[in-house]
Amino acid sequence: MAIHDPAVVALHRYYIWANRMRSHFDDLLQAKDVEQERREIESFLYMSYWYAGLYVVIEGWRELGLSEPTIDELLRSPNVELLRRYRHGVFHFQRDYFDDRFLAFMTKGANTVDWVRDLTLNLGRYFLQRFDPAAYGALRGVDQ
């Protein structure tokens, strides 16, 4: 697969979207002047869209047959299946506010907070290494 494979660039877009939700989530957690009710509602919103978007990246990663040792190891975790169910909870209406699709990721998963952050970080590292300036310029038809 070429460095500037359009399908990998498309996958990167999904990563950017998921990571932006992570950024909003982290910013909200750090904010000092946010009322508690807003913090609770928006933190769940950003976290849920981050997690759901991250699963889309996992789907694309697998569909494209990408491989990288650290990411591959993270994707061997049973957390992947729990994250898939979480994504379904986010993007398919659930009558129960505390549906098991949301709770299972947090209660049955192994170190889910560290795992999801490690996966996000390593996917970001992968894309940064893959899309060096010359390769990204070539994709856009720009000489570097």
Image (cartoon, helix red, strand yellow):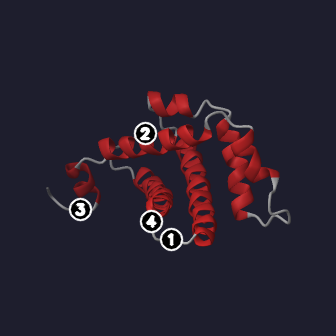
Q: In the image, which disc is placed on residue 70?
A: none
At label 4, the amino acid type is Lys
Badge 3 crowding class, 10 Å Cα cut-off, few under 14, some 14 to 19, many 20 or more, is few
Q: Which residue is mark 4?
A: 32
The answer to whether residue 69 is above or below residue 14 is above
Instruction: Please indicate whether residue 133 sits to the left or right of residue 119 in the image.
Output: left
Q: Is residue 27 left or right of residue 139?
A: right
Count the marks: how many?
4
Residue 34: give its label. Answer: 1
Give the alpha-carbon distance from disc 3 to disc 4, as whole Å: 44 Å
Percent of width and height locating residue 116: 55, 43
Element type where label 4 sits in the image: loop
Q: Percent from the top left, x then y, of residue 96?
A: 85, 62
Most foreground residue, 33 or 69: 33
Q: Position of residue 9 (x, y in %)?
A: 40, 54
Label 1 crowd bin: few (<14), some (14–19), many (20+), radius 10 Å: few
Between the residue at mark 3 and the residue at mark 2, the CA separation in whole angstroms equals: 28 Å
Sooner in the amino-acid sequence: mark 1 or mark 3: 1
Q: Which residue is mark 2?
A: 122
- For the point 58% across and 34% down, the residue is 75
Amino acid on which disc 3 is placed: Gly
Q: Secondary structure at mark 2?
A: helix
Relative to 5, say whether 97 is above or below.
below
Inter-mark Cα distance, 1 to 3: 44 Å
In the rendered structure, which disc, 1 or 2, sits on the residue that comes first in sequence? 1
Q: Residue at x 14, y 55 (%)?
A: 144
Measured from the top left, where is residue 114 in percent x and y? 54, 38
Residue in the foreground of this view, choosing between 23 and 60 = 23
* Badge nearest the viewer, 1 or 2: 1
Alpha-carbon distance for marks 4 and 1?
A: 6 Å
Q: Which residue is mark 3?
A: 141
